[in-house]
Image: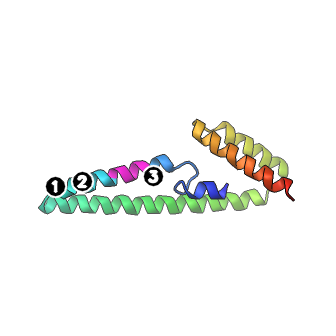
Amino acid sequence: MESSRAGSAGSPGTGGIRDNIQKAIDDLRSAGEKATGEVRSNIDSAVQRLRDASDEATSRASDQVSSWRETLERTTEDVRKELGKLGVRTQISLDALEEISQELDERRKQLSSQ
């Protein structure tokens, strides 16, 4: 799961959020190119605040995932299985389910080669 999550912004499934933040930054930059004086300065500040917020959110999400991973490693097989099922049931997009399916296929290959 780790490898497929790393490319998404740190979250499981945060690619849409990251894309929206990047789009907002791009829009602000475009507006900033046409602006002057105080307006341009305010736009530059907004871009930096968005970047900082995005970086902090990514870091917090990564920390939370690490914490969950540590907790899962200490649980029993039955608990991990039920949590996995719950994770699948809570997905709201086909893309997320496809990503989970790919993770399952990779894990099956790993376990069968042991």
Residue 23 is one of the magenta-drawn residues: yes
Q: In the rendered view of the protein, which quadrant contains the N terminus?
A: bottom right
- Residue at 71%, 40% in the rendered image: 86
Does label 2 or label 3 sit earlier along the sequence? 3
Do tag 1 and tag 2 residues touch (Cβ < 8 Å)? yes
Does label 3 or label 1 sit earlier along the sequence? 3
Asked if 89 appears above or below 15 in the picture, the reply is above
- Residue at 56%, 48% in the rendered image: 13
Badge 1: how crowded within 10 Å, few (<14), some, or many (20+)? few
Q: Which mark is residue 44?
A: none
Query: In the image, residue 20 lies at what x, y percent?
Result: 40, 48
Residue of label 2 = 30
Inspect the image, locate mark 2, and give the three-letter code of the amino acid beneath it. Answer: Ser
| Start-end of magenta stretch | 19-24
**Could you tell me how far apart the alpha carbons at marks 1 and 2 are, in whole angstroms?**
7 Å
Query: In the image, residue 70 lies at what x, y percent?
Result: 71, 62
**Could you tell me how far apart the alpha carbons at marks 3 and 1 are, in whole angstroms?**
25 Å
Residue 42 is one of the magenta-drawn residues: no
Badge 2: how crowded within 10 Å, few (<14), some, or many (20+)? few
For mark 2, give the secondary structure: helix
For mark 1, give the secondary structure: helix
Colour mode?
rainbow
Residue of label 1 = 34
Q: Which mark is residue 18?
A: 3
Q: Place residue 111 in its image quadrant.
A: bottom right
In the image, 66 versus 9, the foreground residue is 9
Query: In the image, residue 97 lies at what x, y percent?
Result: 64, 40
